[in-house]
Image (cartoon, grey):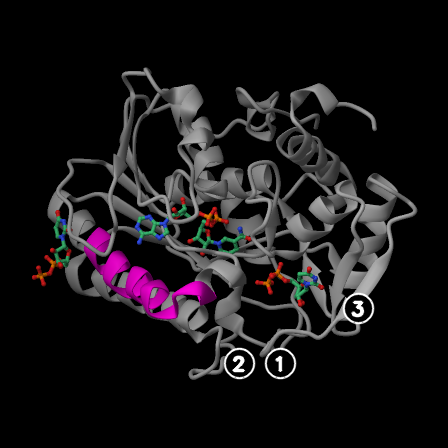
Amino acid sequence: HRVVFDRRVGFVGGVGGKIPLGLKRKGLRIVVTGGAGFVGSHLVDRLIARGDSVIVVDNFFTGFKGNLIHHFGNPRFELIRHDVVEPILLEVDQIYHLACPASPVHYKFNPVKTIKTNVVGTLNMLGLAKRVGARFLLTSTSEVYGDPLQHPQVETYWGNVNPIGVRSCYDEGKRTAETLTMDYHRGAGVEVRIARIFNTYGPRMCIDDGRVVSNFVAQALRKEPLTVYGDGKQTRSFQYVSDLVEGLMRLMEGEHVGPFNLGNPGEFTMMELAQVVQETIDPNAKIEFRPNTEDDPHKRKPDISKAKELLGWEPVVPLRKGLPMMVSDFRQRIFGDHKDGSS
Ligand code: NAD
Ligand code: UDP
Ligand code: UDP
């Protein structure tokens, strides 16, 4: 597959173009909460390209109008500045519920707000889904597995989560959001879907969001040392954003509630990731060790057998292919258009 990212129009020749999706139903009305963010804006691109009408609901905490500016003026696109912690009335067919800060730096900034967003925000969107009979998709997270004692993580694993730690606002918040989703499904008959997303990277990530891929890429481009936390032996599995969006759409359109792990099983230590960034950007980039953060999970890798079997989905963009597309986007945003291309 050849996937190319163009800042102005999004992915060209995208993965979905090659795989018949059975998504030919036109004219759905779809809400994307958090649609001005990193993942949400790529999802909006695909939904608009498919012919749907999209309403983005976002409070711009970590999202930007700039991520959606290419849709302004399109009559099938609408952007509402709104906080999902407050109720909202809309008439729609589907709700992709993404609103929630995702990077540890952002979600720890105001932990009480993070948990309100996860609990009250999700409750409101489920209430909306119930009222209008819309299908609801929750973007949960691999963090529901905590510091996992099972490796790789299967959906049936219940996790190892600290309920009173600094990450709890996010991981316990998402666990409660999953509970609410299942209770609206069982109790009120709402059609729901749950995705557990593993670490995702790509163009439009916030440059200074503190996540490891964005940090390393920005540091290498700025000729700063790559900051490896702890001994760098902890692992993560990195998924390119177009693969995730494909998985989310298949999940929404399919017949299965989930939860489904959506991630790339390619597992890297942080030292290995630093090496790939060096190979891609600057072989001379230095590495600097820093103390690790509290409650940092040691290992993380999705078992995606369930999504493969029931959604016919698996990632197609490996780290070494995806990273260069993110690097050219970061290069443009850090240095301006004129420095695009090889350095
Ligand atoms: P992001 O921070 O780029 O996007 C989140 C969006 O939600 C932003 O536009 C933000 O302004 C908006 N938002 C936050 N709180 C809100 C509120 N109270 N009301 C309305 N809007 C609000 O993050 P992302 O990486 O695009 O993540 C999107 C979703 O996917 C999140 O729910 C996140 O938990 C989940 N997820 C992401 C990853 C990943 O690696 N990117 C991994 C696991 C789960
Ligand atoms: N809600 C909303 N939009 C709607 C319907 C409901 O924001 O179109 C909110 C509503 O304000 C409430 C939450 O969703 O806070 C849960 O709604 P539900 O009807 O399930 O519960 P109830 O209002 O009976 O507590
Ligand atoms: N990390 C790192 N250097 C950084 C930022 C993060 O070594 O500059 C490590 C971090 O300690 C964790 C891993 O990278 O072990 C992934 O962190 P991230 O914040 O990207 O995501 P999450 O912890 O939510 O998986």
- Characterize the local packing of mark 1: few (<14), some (14-19) or many (20 or more) Cα atoms within 10 angstroms: some
Q: Which of marks 3 and 1 is nearer the N terminus?
A: 1
Q: Earlier in the sequence, mark 1 or mark 2?
A: 1
- The answer to whether 158 appears left or right of 178 in the picture is right
Question: Can residue 50 be seen in this snapshot?
Answer: no
The percent coordinates of residue 307 (x first, y second) are 54, 51
Tag 1 residue = 149
Q: Which of marks 3 and 2 is nearer the N terminus?
A: 2
Image quadrant in which you'd find residue 249:
top left
- The answer to whether 23 appears left or right of 275 in the picture is left
Amino acid type, label 1: Leu
Tag 3 residue = 289
- Characterize the local packing of mark 3: few (<14), some (14-19) or many (20 or more) Cα atoms within 10 angstroms: few
Q: Quadrant of ligand 2?
A: bottom left
Which span is picked out in magenta? 108-126
The percent coordinates of residue 210 (x first, y second) are 60, 56
Amino acid type, label 2: Asn
Identify the residue shown where x is 82% and y is 25%.
Answer: 342
Classify 229 as above or below 61: below
Classify 293 as above or below 83: below
Identify the residue shown where x is 40% and y is 28%.
Answer: 47
Identify the residue shown where x is 32% and y is 21%.
Answer: 26
Question: Can residue 324 be seen in this snapshot?
Answer: yes
The numbered dot on residue 160 is 2
Task: State how far apart marks 1 and 2 are (Cα).
Answer: 7 Å
Task: State how far apart marks 3 and 2 are (Cα).
Answer: 27 Å
SS class, disc 1: loop
Instruction: Tell me if residue 295 is in the magenta stretch.
Output: no
Task: State how far apart marks 3 and 1 are (Cα).
Answer: 26 Å
